[in-house]
Image (cartoon, grey):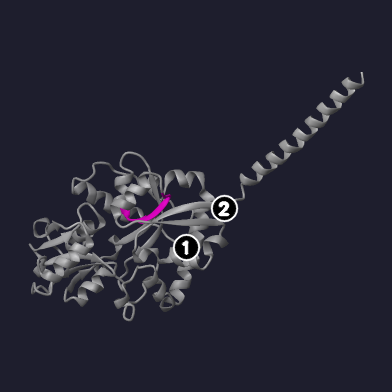
Amino acid sequence: MDNTRLCSSKVRSTLALFGVVLSLLLASCSQTASPDEPVTLKIAVLPILETLPMHVAQEEGLFAENGVVVEFIPVGSGPERDQVISAGQADGMINEAVSTIFYNADQTQIQIVRFARTATPQQHLFSILASGNSGISDIEQLKGVEIGVSQGTVIEYLTDRLLQNQGFSDEEIVTIIVPAIPDRMALLASGELEAGMLPEPPTSITQQQGAVVVLDDTTYPEVSFSVISFRKQTIDEHPGAIRGFLAAIEGAILRINENPDQYIDLLVEKKLLPPPLAGSFEVPTYPTAGVPTPEQWADAVAWTIEKGLNDVQVSYESSITDEFLP
């Protein structure tokens, strides 16, 4: 009888101890799965001027202030960026309307949530340059001249639209495919390429090597802009993180626009600007919160169809949203 009571007592003690351990384990699991834990957004970043606000937001703690953790995934080119996004290895990126159209032709994979940069009548993003050896200095001299572009990209889109805006016929616009920007720059410098389209800062570098800007997008700024996009799955699963991210970007842009010279060193440090340009380059003004208009989107879609690159009227509503802007 005493043995029975002793065994019963041991069983109760064992069960009590198990209950304590189980409670501790459940509490631990509850803590690691806390709904208040910040979401980590992975951003595929190219070494381009558009990423400066992201670096400022990271360096100055603005992402943390807005309850989001951001991890940068460095990429070296547009195709590499697209591979990373398609594989789900990054959540967001800087791109443009043309590539968004290709992403969403069959189903909505990404959505534009904000402008990254925009051309204005005072500030260019892209320029058509002529080699210093070409003798070209006037827009009319570009008729029939091969202009180096990357095919099916914003570079080719802008080349067509800027020249069409100057009255060029389709027959007078001649392009040659030179996909890599460094190759375009080298060919312009050597004179093997008479003309080419480039963004900044490659435009300024190539000018230092003797090239001449013949036409830039200040003449038709409506068609020239870059955007911030996120995978639709990320937007649907973490809308609060998207809002926090964009609030941080807005804060960073206000700081940059108020004191642009303060960020020259950061541009160089993050390899967004070559050191030789640091003394003369003007930090661009970044746009405050906004997204492309239906008209801007429709023109980009029309161009992809004109060029035979796409046969779908990809809708504005499925590809662009302003609901997360601060």
Residue 318 position, x and y percent, is 39, 45
Q: How many marks?
A: 2
Circle 2 — which element?
loop
Could you tell whether 234 is left or right of 46 in the image? right
Within the image, what quadrant is residue 27 found in?
A: top right
Whichever of callouts 2 and 1 sits on the residue coming sooner in the sequence is 2
Look at the image and give the residue range highlighted in magenta: 90-97
Circle 2: residue type? Pro
Relative to residue 298, is residue 191 depicted above or below?
below
Q: Which residue is mark 2?
A: 38
Residue 185 position, x and y percent, is 19, 67
Within the image, what quadrant is residue 280 found in?
A: bottom left
Circle 1 — which element?
helix
Q: Depth check: 215 or 176 in front?
A: 176
Q: Which residue is mark 1?
A: 249
Identify the residue at horizontal 17%, vertical 65% (top origin). Answer: 196
Circle 1: residue type? Ile
Relative to residue 250, is residue 153 depicted above or below?
above
Residue 214 position, x and y percent, is 17, 72
Mark 2 or mark 1, whichever is nearer to me = 2
